[in-house]
Image: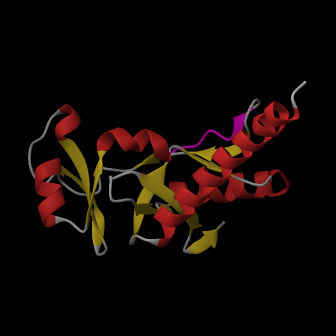
Amino acid sequence: MNTRFIALAVALPALTLALSIADAEDNLAGGESYRLPVEGYDPRDLLRGRYLRYRVKLDAAPPLDDCTGSACCLCLSQDGPPRVASCELARTQCDAAMPQRHLKDLRRYYIPEGQARQLERRFIDAARDDEADIVVTVGADGKPYVEHLELRGERIE
């Protein structure tokens, strides 16, 4: 076989992975952080490893205005819960606007296998007491990147 072809076959996936990691790190470093309350629980996926599964709680605050479908965004602010608003309003009046279609990107938080049982129990207790949050950074395109999980104010990386 051609050694150039083999080298390219090995280098291309490694380069793609490195670029995707660099892009995620750049988005995390360049934006503001927002705390989103979460609820829910589903700890296992046999194919993908251990994770905590949750959903962002949106019923903490009334919507800012009426919106439907893809025109809806989460209005994020440093000093209040996330609120639903039209994307146009959220982009002009909020600290950050995250299109609701990106909520699906925030459903899982992977955890180390060795800490899984302990974190699962802590997450259940904290979520039941409304003390479970994820901290996200929102990119310029509105895509969220999870920084970390907080349980009862303690940062879980």
85 vs 152: above or below: above
Quadrant where the image shows the N terminus: top right
Q: Please name whichever residue, 83 or 34, is drawn nearer the observer in this view of the structure.
A: 34
Please state the total of marks drawn on the protein image: 0
Q: Which of the 4 image quadrants contains residue 30?
A: bottom left
Q: Residue at x 52, y 54 (%)?
A: 128
Which color scheme did the rendering employ for the protein? secondary structure
At 80% from the left and 31% from the top, the residue drawn is: 5
Relative placement, left or right, of 145 versus 108 is left
Q: Is residue 110 above or below residue 152?
A: above
Q: Is residue 50 visible?
A: yes
- Tell me the magenta residue range: 40-45
The quarter of the picture where residue 96 lies is bottom left
Asked whether 75 falls inside the magenta stretch, the response is: no
Residue 132 appears in the rendering: no
Dominant SS of magenta comes to loop
Q: Nearer the viewer, residue 142 or 110?
A: 142
Side of 130 relative to 86 (left or right) = right
Please tell me which residue lies in front, 129 or 83: 83
Counting from the top left corner in percent of width and height, residue 67 is at 12, 40
* Horizontal and vertical percent position of residue 85: 16, 50
Residue shown at the point (77%, 58%) measured from the top left: 118
- Measuring 17% from the left and 58% from the top, which residue is drawn there? 91
